[in-house]
Image (cartoon, rainbow, N blue to C red):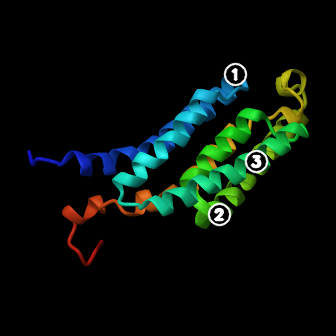
Amino acid sequence: MPDIEPERLAAVLLPFGFPALLAVAAAGDLARRRIGNRLALALALLYPPAALAAGAGAAEIAWHVGAGAAVLAAGLALAMANLLGGGDAKLLAAAASWTGFSALPAFLIAVALAGGVMALALLLARALPGSRTADSAPPARDMPYGPAIAVGGLVVWPEMAVVSSLPNPWSTILPTWIV
């Protein structure tokens, strides 16, 4: 088995924390209608070491953190207006620190589209005659948005710099003209 340098191993493994933590947040939000502060903080704090391991410089990391801070400010304003949950705002901001400003529009569009699909599915489920969802589901404004944030993050994840800098795993198996 070949020796792998710890730095290279970190560069390969750390980016997978993003989809893993988003999946945990989505599942928790579906089950309990709550996204914990520690989870959002862990997601945000995982970005700098992942970026450093991928070769990002301090300026690039600072811009990404700035994107997260901008989304946090907007998200908390929406939360104060009761348009978005506080946990959703923090998770959205933590994910935005990974996307940075360059992938932020695509991320937010993907989140909005996923949220729209979820809301439509909820409305359709409530419209079914004899649906338990109609009686037991919370109002649409209380829809858990963690899954939509996770879908949006997964949509842009392959294009993130920390992921796109990874070697193509197929390049060692397939001939170069295929990859």
Nearer the N terminus, badge 2 or badge 3? 3
From the viewer's side, name the closer residue of 152 and 70: 70
Q: Is residue 146 left or right of residue 5?
A: right
User: Vertical placement of 135 versus 65: above or below?
Assistant: above
Residue under label 3, please give it: 73
Looking at the rendering, which quadrant does residue 176 occupy?
bottom left
From the viewer's side, name the closer residue of 56 and 59: 59
Label 2 SS: helix
Q: Amino acid at mark 3?
A: Ala
Q: Amino acid at mark 1?
A: Arg
Q: Is residue 151 left or right of residue 130?
A: left
| x 84%, y 32%: residue | 142
Mark whose residue sits in front, 2 or 3: 3
Q: Amino acid at mark 2?
A: Ala
Residue under label 2, please give it: 106
- In the image, residue 109 lies at what x, y percent? 71, 60
